[in-house]
Image (spheres, grey):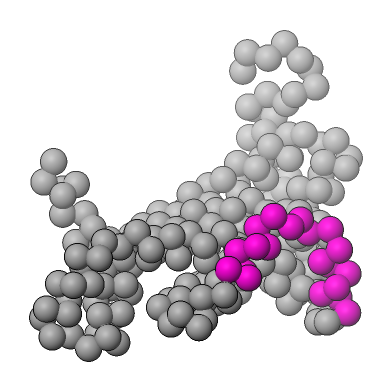
């Protein structure tokens, strides 16, 4: 609103860009990206929980450490390697997003597990729980609200990386391909309209995730509601 630059589009220009983008297939591209993101989220949650909870078995702890080391590696070279290993562009993109999210999700969940006080384990054992029951009650159920927060944070990371991944493999299209195409032709009003769309969809995904947390973990909101 306040910028003197004539290069930046005005809010009105951005608003008028939405009908043009809709006619260009914004809804279809958005659904393509959401489908890709859903596949990546499902695999990330499955892999992250299996690897993180397996650290309860000392022999499997190096697996989580192995995954966490990939936090310091970029995507350079990975697309080519995955092309040879997988071949299908959709699943290459899914794999890239899973790698991007899981390498942060796993160490965060492991850190939350390691932060559980010893008193919680001792209390469970005093109640004559078996070791598997201790794992379920103390580690899995007892910290599930924290796990949901960690997953939601890393889902946001994956959503912001989606345009880059779709820009590498453009065959299926997607919102990332659309925003890169509009940016190539310097249609900034369309670029900002797509950015707003992605932000609103991201906030919706986050809201759905927090609603699921409230349903599954109502105990996590007890102290907040009393205040």
In the rendered view of the protein, which quadrant contains the N terminus?
A: top right
In this orientation, which residue lies closer to the viewer: 210 or 67?
67
In the rendered view of the protein, which quadrant contains the C terminus?
A: top left
Q: Which residue lies furthest to the top in this view?
A: 4
Residue, x 72% and y 67% (percent of image)? 96
Q: Is residue 77 above or below residue 224?
A: below
Residue 170 spot, x, y in % from top left: 84, 63
Residue, x 63% and y 13% (percent of image)? 2
In this orientation, which residue lies closer to the viewer: 69 or 169?
69
Number of marks drawn = 0
Query: In the rendered view, does 85 fall on the left or right side of 159?
Result: right
Residue 10 spot, x, y in % from top left: 68, 24
Asked if the magenta segment contains residue 17, the reply would be no
Magenta part, dominant SS: helix
Q: Is residue 140 above or below residue 31?
A: below
Residue, x 67% and y 33% (percent of image)? 14
Query: In the rendered view, does 111 fall on the left or right side of 222?
Result: right
Query: In the rendered view, does 175 fall on the left or right side of 122?
Result: right
Residue 60 spot, x, y in % from top left: 52, 81
Residue 7 spot, x, y in % from top left: 80, 22
Corner quadrant of residue 31: bottom right
Q: Give the range drawn in magenta.
A: 65-84
Is residue 155 in sight in this rendering? Answer: no
Is residue 198 in sight in this rendering? Answer: yes
Residue, x 35% and y 59% (percent of image)? 115
């Amino acid at each position: 609103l306040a910028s003197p630059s004539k290069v930046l589009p005005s809010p009105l220009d951005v608003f008028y860009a939405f009908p043009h983008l809709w006619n260009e297939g914004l809804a279809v591209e958005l659904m393509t990206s959401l489908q890709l993101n859903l596949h990546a989220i499902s695999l990330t949650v499955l892999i992250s929980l299996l690897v993180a909870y397996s650290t309860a078995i000392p022999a499997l702890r190096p697996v989580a450490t192995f995954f966490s080391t990939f936090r310091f590696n970029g995507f350079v070279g990975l697309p080519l390697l995955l092309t040879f290993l997988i071949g299908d562009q959709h699943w290459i993109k899914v794999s890239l997003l899973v790698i991007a999210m899981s390498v942060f999700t796993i160490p965060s969940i492991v850190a939350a597990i390691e932060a559980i006080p010893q008193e919680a384990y001792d209390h469970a054992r005093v109640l004559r729980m078996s070791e598997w029951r201790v794992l379920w009650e103390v580690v899995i159920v007892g910290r599930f609200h924290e796990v949901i927060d960690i997953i939601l944070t890393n889902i946001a990371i994956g959503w912001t990386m989606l345009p880059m991944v779709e820009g590498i493999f453009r065959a299926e299209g997607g919102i990332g391909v659309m925003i890169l195409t509009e940016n190539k032709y310097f249609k900034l009003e369309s670029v900002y309209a797509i950015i707003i769309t992605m932000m609103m969809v991201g906030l919706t995904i986050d809201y759905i995730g927090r609603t699921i947390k409230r349903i599954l973990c109502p105990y996590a909101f007890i102290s907040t509601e009393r205040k």
